[in-house]
Amino acid sequence: MQTRWGPVQVQITVAASTITKVTVLQQPNGNPRDTEINDYALPILIKETTSAQSAQIDMVSGATVTSDGYLRSLQAAIDEAGM
């Protein structure tokens, strides 16, 4: 998903209708602040995803753009997996 700071793309691994792994394939990386935000926010988003087993998770405060792109890409991956 395209965000104003760059693309966010996630891939999910599914086994027996369970999200077992989330891999971030693309993330905003245009400057050191992007890296700092993503290093903080993405592990939280991934952990929440595997706990919730859906895209119905909270955004990370201070990482709204990355969180939004992550959630939209995650939902697309979940839809593609037929979950």
Image (cartoon, rainbow, N blue to C red):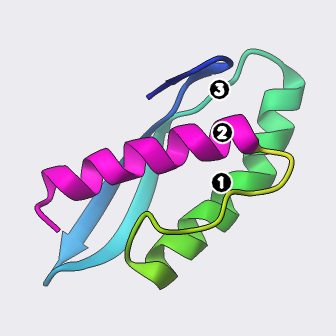
Between marks 2 and 3 in the image, the one whose residue lies nearer the viewer? 2
Residue type marked 1: Leu
Residue type marked 3: Pro
Picture quadrant where residue 45 is located: bottom right
User: Which residue is identified by label 1?
Assistant: 42
Front in this rendered view, residue 9 or 1: 1
In the picture, the quarter occupied by the N terminus is top left
At x 11%, y 62%, the residue is: 82
Q: Tell me whether circle 2 and circle 1 mark residues in contact (CB < 8 Å).
A: yes
Badge 1 marks a residue whose secondary structure is helix
Badge 2 marks a residue whose secondary structure is helix
- Segment tinted magenta in the rendering: 64-83
Picture quadrant where residue 68 is located: top right
Q: Is residue 70 above or below residue 28?
A: below
User: Which residue is identified by label 2?
Assistant: 66
Q: Of the numbered discs in the image, which one, if any, rests on residue 54?
A: none
